[in-house]
Each structure stands twice: as C-alpha cells, then as structure tokens.
Image (cartoon, rainbow, N blue to C red):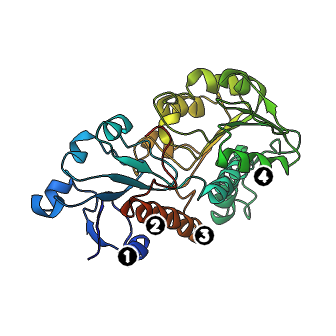
Amino acid sequence: MRHKVLIYSRFPKAQMVRFGERYDLLNAAGKRPADAFAVAELGDVRALITAGGTPLGADAMDMLPKLGAIVCYGTGYDGVDLVAAAARKIAVGHSPGANATSVADIAVTLMLASVRRLPVADHYVRSGDWAGAKPSPMMRPQAGMRGRRVGVYGLGAIGRKIATRVAAFETEVGYFSRTKHDVPYHYFPSLEALADWCSVLMVAVRAGADTNHAVNADILRRLGGEGFVVNVSRGSVIDEKALVAALAGQTIAGAGLDVFAQEPHPPDALTALPNVVLSPHIGGHTLESHVAMQDCVLANLEAFFAGKPLPYQVKGV
C-alpha cells in the first residue's frame, strides 16, 4: 500500500508528477486541508509537501494528527512555523543548494539588466525612438561593471555562486553574513558597512524574523545615487515602501527584483518605475533546478517513511 502525501501549496501539476509515481497525493492546491478533504482522508496523512514561503502554522499542522514530516520544495522554509513543528515532533526538510546555480544566474542577469538599463534600451528600439533619433535621458552613458564594488548580503550556497560570477566582471567583491568565511572577498562586520562600501548590493540572505526589512531606507541611502540593489531572496528582506521612495526620488539608481513582499502582486507604485527590472520569482525555475529540488524532496520522503532521519533536515528542528 502506497503512503499518502498531502500537497499543501499550489504547484504546477508537472512539478508533482515524480511524486505521484511513488505516493498517493492529496492535492489541496493551496486551500486549507480541512476545506479540501474530509477529516477521515487527512487522518492518516504523515507527510506533506509545501513551498517554503507558504504560511504553514500550528492550525494547519493540527488538521493532520499523524503528521510527522513537512518537506519544502526548494531551499526556503520561512513560511513554516518551526517552533510549532518542533513542539509536535514534526521534522522539517528542504532542498538546500538545489537551485543555487539558477538563482545566482538570475541575480547576475538582473544586475546587468539594471546597471545597463536593458528594459529601457529594449523599449527604445521597439518604440521606434532609436530609428527616429528621439533623445532619451535614460539612454545616457552609465557607469559599467568594471571597477564596481559589489556587496553580497548572505554568503550561503547562492551568495557564494553570485560572488564567483560577479568577480568575473572585473569588480571588487565584498560580503556580510552571520559568519566570516575563508573566501577571497572583503568581509564587512555589518550590513551598514557593506552598503557604505558597495554600489551594487546583491541580497541573497535567508528570510526570517532577523532579516525582515533589513534593507531599509537607511541601507538604501548608504548605497547612494549610483547604487543598485538586486533581490533574489524573499520580498520581506527589503522594505518595499522605502525601496519605491528611493527609486522614485533617485536616492539609488535602480533595482532588480525577482521577489516581492506580496506575490504575485507587486505594488503599482513599483511596476510604474522605469529604473527597476522585474521578474516573476523565476530564480530557481529551470529544468535542472526542478529535478534537483525534486530529488531532495524524494530523498526526504523516502527516509521519513523508512523511519530514518531526513537527509536534508532544517537544522534545529
């Protein structure tokens, strides 16, 4: 008899195919489990799959009396109430580093698109303004990448790959993280010190209470009028209202964002600005990343149902 696994978040069906080959899936499609299924169906569910950013608190856990494992599809787990899970002896797993390469790639893409104003340039060509020799202040020459100071906030798997990539653009690289690492980059003791030093701030830190709105109006002011911020972490790390004000008031030169405070609804005040490049949380959305994340999910589920510790368990849970 195959084990039941609840699909807690809303996922594209194609991403769940491999799980359905091994387990009987109950797909709540983002609804409360009790609203999607009868109590009897949920009574023997021992594991669920969720997106790390989806809120999953004690109330949801208590709908599943036999729940023993919460497995996050992806590296993040910020939506899971870890205290509630630990109190209920529920193991929490994720997919550390599985999408690091793809997320680092999109971070560099957003950096280059922002610094070189590619969306503006694209519109300049498509609109006919280039052919018509129409002047555009947004098309004035800008400082390129060579010699720039790039600061990486968070030097985990993604942050390290970002640092490696941006160094190839003849930049200086610095970083701030909770731990000083043995890497060939400048270490700064605080985010404030990093922002004072760099002109491009790459946000790759893990989301949590300690990083909520860490990039605030003060940090943006420290970046300065030629500064850029790129966020591939979570929208919660940047104070979005402060960012809109900094972009509109030219406190900073621009931004590149793959994540937002309320997805999929970035505020109109942000999307209306010409000096920000936006993408719909696609950092880890490559074929290779999905296979790697699914491999981690399957490894966690297999270990759990075999009575073994999760190989990719969130530390401290």
Whether label 1 touches label 2, CB < 8 Å: yes
Residue shown at 51% from the left, 47% from the top:
259
Residue 284: percent from left, percent from top: 56, 59
Which residue corresponds to mark 4? 165
For the image, the number of numbered tags is 4
Judged from the image, the secondary structure of the residue bearing numbered disc 2 is helix
Residue 295: percent from left, percent from top: 52, 67
Within 10 Å of the Cα at label 4, are there few (<14), some (14-19), or many (20+) other Cα atoms?
some
Judged from the image, the secondary structure of the residue bearing numbered disc 4 is helix
Which residue corresponds to mark 1? 22
Q: Earlier in the sequence, mark 1 or mark 2?
A: 1
Q: Amino acid at mark 2?
A: Leu
Q: Quadrant of residue 221?
A: top right
Q: Note whether residue 38 is visible.
A: no
Q: Earlier in the sequence, mark 3 or mark 4?
A: 4
Q: For the residues carrying marks 2 and 3, which lies nearer the camera in this image?
A: 2
Residue 154: percent from left, percent from top: 65, 37
Q: Amino acid at mark 4?
A: Arg
Q: CA distance from mark 3 to mark 1?
A: 21 Å
Q: CA distance from mark 2 to mark 4?
A: 30 Å
**Disc sitting over residue 288 in the figure:** 3
Q: Earlier in the sequence, mark 4 or mark 1?
A: 1
- Work out which quarter of the rendered image holds the C terminus and state it: top left
Which residue corresponds to mark 2? 298
**Disc sitting over residue 113 in the figure:** none
Q: CA distance from mark 2 to mark 3?
A: 15 Å
Residue 146: percent from left, percent from top: 88, 44
Q: Earlier in the sequence, mark 2 or mark 3?
A: 3
